Every structure is written in C-alpha cells, then in structure tokens.
Image (tube, helix red, strand yellow):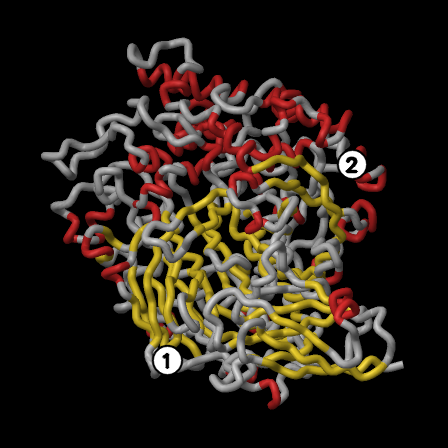
Amino acid sequence: MATSVAATLGASVVGTASAEHSEEVEETNTPGAPSVEGELKRFSTTAFGAEVTGPFVFDDGGLLYSLQHPSEENPEPFDRAGIGYFSGFNFELDGDNDDFEEVSTPQTEDEQGRVRAGNGEYTLLARGREPINGGAERLGVTQTPDGTDIVRADAANAEPERKNRPYFAGTQYGLAASNPDCNQFVPTDDGTAGYLFTNWENSPGNISRIPISQDDDGEWEADLENAINLANTDALRDLGGTRINCYGDRSPWNTMISSEENYAQPRVSLTHTVGDIVEADSGKGLVGGCQFWNRPNPNGIGEAIVEYYGEDEAFEPQGYWALTGVEFLAYYLGAEQVDQPDADQPDEETLSDTTPIVDVYPNPYRYGYHVDVREPTADEPQPVKYYVMGRAAWESPNVQADERTVYGCSDGDSKGIYKFVADEPIPSYEDPMDVAGTLYAPKITNDAASAPETGKRNSPADVDLEVEWIELGHASNAEAEAWIADYDDVTQEDYLAHAETDWEDDPEAALEEADKAVIENGNRNYITNEEIVEWAAQFEAHGPDGVDEELRRVPFLEMRAAAKEIGASIEFNKAEGVDSVDGAQPGDFVYFGISEFNDDMADDTGDLRMDRVDGGVVYRAELEADYNVSTLEPVIVGPDFTDPPADADDALRNVDNVYAMDDGRLICCEDGFGGPARSYPNDGLYVYDPDPDGESGDDDDMGFHTPPADDPLNARFRDCCANTVDTPPENGILNLDLVYGAYEGPYDVEITSPELSESEIDEITFDNADDDPYDLTRDDIVGMDVSDVPAGEYEFTVSVVDADATAMVSFEIED
C-alpha cells in the first residue's frame, strides 16, 4: 500500500520506504555541523544526570524550568527532582541576547553537580515527593483509588522513610515523581499569582497543580499545602489517567495542555509497515511493542524473545521497554494487585510474573494524546483528551492563533510530525467532545532530501524540507472515544487466550504460546493487521472519506501504522519540540526540534536519505495565510558526534523542548547527557536569537511588556522576525503587538484611523476571534495584512473596549 499516497498528492510523491530495514550511514564530518543561522548563547547548564525540561517565561521575563531525574550523588538540593526559577534574573524581552551573561561550560565536579547560570540563582520551588494537599498526597506521586501511593519496591532503598510504607513490585517508567517535565503557568490576576501546572513523566502519569505567588521583591513562593495531583482526582481517573506526561503547551484559551509520550505505541518496528508483516505471514523481527500491551509482565517480552529464539535470531520490538508501568496503571485504575510480595515480608521478590490481571486493565487506545486541562482554577479541574488529534508518543502540541490548527511532534525513531485542523475554533465547541476536524501526516517531497535523486547525501544544514500534508481522515472527538470504548473490557486474560494451553493449568506454557502467536499473527484483542491493510487499500481506491465505516477508526487509533502504510514520511528521529510565539500570525514562524538526524533520516530507505548529524537540527517554518506550513528551514544544526570538543562544547546538542519567547527568541533545551563530542556531561539551556543584527533591541522597546499602571496599554508593529518596524515588510503582514498591563480576563480592542474607514480596517485586520470578540490575553497579537493598502502614512488609535486604556501606533507605506 506504500504507493497509495499518490492518489492523494499526485505522481510526484510516489516512492516510499522499502520493507527491509536498513542501517544508518556512518557519521562523517558533515558540512554545516555545527552551525547557526543567527546567534546561540548558553544561559544555563543543569545538574549532572538531569535533562533541561519544562522552560517557562513569566510576563516579567522570569525563567523557570524543571530539574528532571538528577543524579542522587549530586550535592543537595540538586540530588532530587524538582521545579525551580532563577532568582534575581529577568529577560528584558527586547529580542536581544545582551540581557544575560553566557555561562561557562561545567568542567569541575562542583560545577557539574549543580544548576548554573550566568545570571540569577536557581531556586527550587518544589521537589518531587514532598507532602502536598494537607499531607494527603506527595507531589508527583499517583495513588490507587484507596489512596495508596504507587511507588515501586526498589524505591525503598532510595528513601529510608518508605521502609514501613506500602510499595509495589514491578516497573514504573522511572522512579515516582523523579521526572518533572513541562511547566505552564495559568495566572489568576495580573501575573503575580496563579497555578503552576507540571507534567510528571512516569507511568502512571501525572499533572500537578501548585498555587504560586510573587512578592514585591520578585521572588516566587509555592503553596504546597494547597497543591494537588490531578492524577488522583476523579475527573482524570475517569478518563483512565495518563502515562508518560512529557512536554505540552499553554493554549490560546489559557489552559495547560499536557502531552502523553506513549513510547509503547509503535505497531511495527522502525521502517517496517504492517503490510510487511502480512506479506511475510509473520511479525518476527518486524512487530512493535504495543502488541504486547496486555501481556502479563508486558516489558518482559524482551527477555522472553531471547529465550524463545536464541541470541542469533532475537529482536527487540520497538518501544517494548516503555511497557514499564502498564501494570501499575491497572492498579491505579483499581485492579486487584497480583504478583505482589506478601505484606508481612516487604523485601520478598515477586513470586510470579504470569498471573494475569483479569478485572480492570488499561485500554491502550486511551493513552498517547494531548490532554487539555479545562477549568484550570476550579477545585477539581476537568481534563479532556483530544482523541481526534491522533494517538502517538506526543512530545508536545503547538496550537495556532486561529485556535483550529495544531502541530504535534511524536518522539522516537521512525516517527512523524502531524497536523490537525479543527472545523471550528476549538474553544467555540460548547462540549469539547464535539471538537471535529481533519488529521494529516507529512510527506517530504523535494529531491534534495533524497540521495538517489541527487546522487549524493546532502547535509541537513543545506536543505530545506518541503512538506505536503496527507489527509488521513475526519472525525469528532466523541466518535474517536466511542471507537476506543470498544476495547475497554480487554484484560491480560484475553492475551493468554491466544494460546492453546489453558493458563490456569500451565501459566508459563500458555504465556510462551501466546507470545509466539502474537509475534506471528498480531494481537487479535485490538485492531488487527488485516484491518490496517484493508483501510490502506480502501484509502488508495477511494480516498480518506471513502473507507468503510468500521475502518474510519484506523488512522486515529493506529496513526503511525496507518500513515506508514500509505507512504507518509514517518521517518523523523526524536521529533521533540514544536512552538511558536503566542498569538503567532501568518508570516511568523513555527519551530520544530529534531533531537537526532540519524537512523531513518540517514539510511537507504524512504523519502529522507541525507547525511547524518547525531546532534540534531532545529527547523523553522513560516506560517502561511491559512496557518499551514510547507517548508522546514534548518536554522540550528548540532554537532557530529565525531567532532572534537572545540566544535561541540558550545553547540546545541540533542534539542528537546523548544519555547518561543514573546520577543521572538527561542529557548532550546538539551537531552543529550554525556556521550561523545563534548568535554563535559551536562545538558544546557540555550537562547537562540534569529536576528542578532535586527531592530528589536532599541532602547524605545525596553519595558514594553511592563506598561505603567496609569498607561496600561502598549502597542507596536512587528514583522515576522519579531523586529519592531514602522514600515511593512514585503509580504505586507504586520503583527500589532499588544500588552495590557491591567489585564484581568479576556478583552477586546477597537482600532481606528483617520486615514482608513471602519470597514477598511475590518478588511485588513485578522485575529483569533471566534463568536466571542473578547478573546485577547495580556500579551497578544492582532494581525494586519496591508499588502493592498495604498502608499502613505497611517496612524492608529488602539483602545481597550469598556476600559480607559489607549495606545497610538503608526506605519508608513512607501511608494
């Protein structure tokens, strides 16, 4: 089915990955690796063992990020996970990297063991496993329905105080509350108080909400007494909870969106397709980890395959290792706790790995989504999962200002970037389950990205990626949830039904028979291989709207497998960050972080066959009039891992989260930790200035984001590169940048000009308004397209509706 994409996009895009997996090319001295289009400056290095995750910039320019899984050998307080801010420092938000000193590389043991910055002092607001909610919970720790903390048994060694507490034998995808990731602040007043939402990247997953406030000296304080774990609320448990909550975003409607990085969702491994399995009449060497989801001791399949086939024929199903914590997720939902040590002998090893969970078991199709925390300030927030946006190992979403277009990156090897476009602005749906729209997968179409077409392997630094979007299907959130519900009653007992032997008679024999049957023919408890291949055949013949009703679920529940089957470019390796400035308009940029440019992007299969850069690439894509992107331009290229420290020490390596600041700069976080090339093992946080020689650093721009109380509205015109301008760029697109210091909730503005009539202003103005015009936030953007406005000087008065706040702004269109 790999050529069926031609029916959608035309003959020019025919040509897809071979059924045979090929190895990546050897790394050489790739031209342009490392390189930067602009300026890159290191702000901070984190403590040894930790990633830099969860950056957030407050309205006053203050910076916060998470200390994720640091080494326990670090000195206090850098020996345990937490969330901290940089006391005594604020970005000036003027678009210029001159507002901070670059921190040196960490060369001594002392420097490597702590969080460092050239400005400010990293101050922890909260640490994982601290008591919260009146002592009823611990920060980041999920609980069973009866309130028992879900912490794996070996954590008792790390925390002596847990010796006399209940704990669980099994796997958890990291120590409980050791992996804080995304942070999003939802203000409740002028930006000095509100709720900090934090992802916890474990299984079961979690989102915490901490009330924080800022004093008159600019210091932040956390109210842990009134903090809660959303995972332990009825609202989130009723959705099945979450797993592996990674990065996320703050939506245009001012809510936290948490992304589930469900690494265990691959249906097939690496470059393979479901069609390869059907054609071979076996999944041996091809099958992915998700097929073993409801296996007793799911991640034990790795060792079992070695036992079944021997070292020479053994293989690793992609993502199987991320099945850790699935059984704990069942206990979180209320399942009877099987395979647990006797309560009187807490140090006894698990007695059995094969006793199935037969009462309550998580449905795999309920995990791997963007989770919108609606009603974020309520006593119990009301989370919503966007099933209609597709199931993946989501690192993060980026919701555009039209409130309809969403870009997402799926982390891992041979993965994709995806696009979803809602029929209407998402907050305009009274019931979020009614959100409906179209799901798209990428197709890279330019010859320069493919060695067979050019006769050589081009460097990623030299080639833009041209993207066309393949429509996978259209549905509503409610439709997708109904399809998912069909699999709610499947348990581990159903997995063992693949065997001929009754598991109650001989559990070990039954498990081996079931494993081999699933490897050969797929897991028959869920969507089958045959259904995916049939969907692709009907897609090729009739398009996405012409498939049978019962097959419409396939691209939403098995998005990666479906997209691969029709020849989409599901070849990105560790597509991590995606972000744009809040309120980004056509002409602005969306940034995509690809942590490693290797494996399926630098092999002999598929649409991407380029030179290899293990240090990764950051791309940017200009938003078009309809918020589409079609060209990914490399702006930061990491080092080859064969580069010497002289080249690699100051280069961005293995980008993870990216965060677009309001002034157009981009925060880039690393997840590389150690490895070759550098002289030090720590990850860092870098700030990318796309236009270091631009106009955005003028003195007149200073303080723009903190207007005085007696004149609370600031306004200016900016171009797509966040430069303050008084003449429009060539494309005629201007961003009217607004900051309303007296903001207490959504507001609207009136724009008037003596040179233009009301109707003429309406014609050139566009924003993210839907049925409710009162949709602007404290820092927001109103777009203007003046490409058809005659030459001349134009002055505008911008007024906040129903408030005493105005600002004057002007531009000149030259002949």
User: Closer to the N terminus: mark 1 or mark 2?
Assistant: 2
- x 19%, y 55%: residue: 135
- x 22%, y 27%: residue: 351
Query: Looking at the image, which is closer to me, 163 or 376?
Result: 376
**What residue occupies the far front of the structure in this picture?**
802
* Secondary structure of residue under mark 1: loop
Q: Report how far apart the C-alphas of labels 1 and 2 lie in the structure.
A: 55 Å
Residue, disc 1:
218
Q: Position of residue 365 (x, y in %)?
A: 48, 33
Q: Quadrant of the N terminus?
A: top right
Q: Quadrant of the C terminus?
A: bottom right
Asked whether residue 718 is in view, the answer is yes
Residue, disc 2:
8
The kind of residue tagged 1 is: Gly
Q: Estimate how packed mark 1 is, as few (under 14), some (14 to 19) or many (20 or more) residues with alpha carbons within 10 Å.
A: some
Relative to 796, 595 lies left or right = left
Q: Position of residue 419 (x, y in %)?
A: 64, 47
Relative to 23, 346 lies left or right = left
Q: Position of residue 746 (x, y in %)?
A: 52, 65
